Image: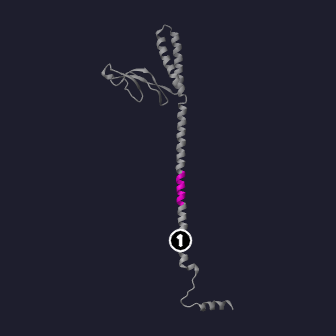
Amino acid sequence: MSKKGKVEEMNGELNDSQTVENPELNDENITNEATTEQEEVSVEDQLRNELAKEKDKFLRLFAEFENFKKRTSKERMDLFKTAGQEVIVSLLPVLDDFDRALKEISKSDDKEMFKGVELINNKLKETLKGKGLERIEVGEGDVFDAEVHDAITQIPAPNKKLKGKIIDVVEKGFKLGERIIRHPKVVVGN
């Protein structure tokens, strides 16, 4: 039998109630294809969302690292500025002793000794000033500031103008850079 005969025979066997279905045009297949496309789209959307989340994490981590670098750099600079703080603080009593010695030597008749000690004192002060040490200037009649001054006692003010103000400076104060390393000890009028 030829091919043409087989096709006619098959067509003859079909009655009117039966139809030949094209597997590509089946409703079930169309629904499956639409679902597959939606799944592909949703997978693509998920991947985009994950990528956006990872980019956000990366940017935050990068910003955090940049802040860390800036902070450590600033801390390092502050450390360099105050690296010799312990040594300088230990030399402050020596400066006090020099001031007391100069006061006593100025009372004597030996002016050459006074000049020699004064030169050494000035040289020490200039060397420490070169390292960032500054004296905190405090005088009688200045307003008392608890952030800067250290009140060791209060006495009745000799006059009303000195009430709440500094009457006497017992010990000089110093700062290293912007940081106070020894507060001036003062007497305040009450």
| Residue 148 locus on image (x, y percent) | 42, 28
Name the residue that disc number 1 marks: 35
Image point (53%, 69%), residue name: 38
Q: Quadrant of residue 30?
A: bottom right
Q: Main secondary structure of the magenta part?
A: helix
Which residue occupies the foreground of this view, 112 or 85?
85
Q: Quadrant of the C terminus?
A: top left
Which residue occupies the foreground of this view, 112 or 151?
151
Label 1: which secondary element: helix
Residue sitting farthest toward the right:
1
Residue numbers of the magenta segment: 48-58
| Residue 5 locus on image (x, y percent) | 66, 92
- Confirm whether the magenta stretch covers residue 54: yes
- Confirm whether the magenta stretch covers residue 173: no
Apparent side of residue 15 relative to residue 185 in the rendered image (left or right): right
Image point (50%, 22%), residue name: 92
Residue sitting farthest toward the left:
160
| Residue 36 locus on image (x, y percent) | 55, 70
Q: How many numbered dots are placed on residues in this image?
A: 1
Q: Quadrant of residue 163?
A: top left
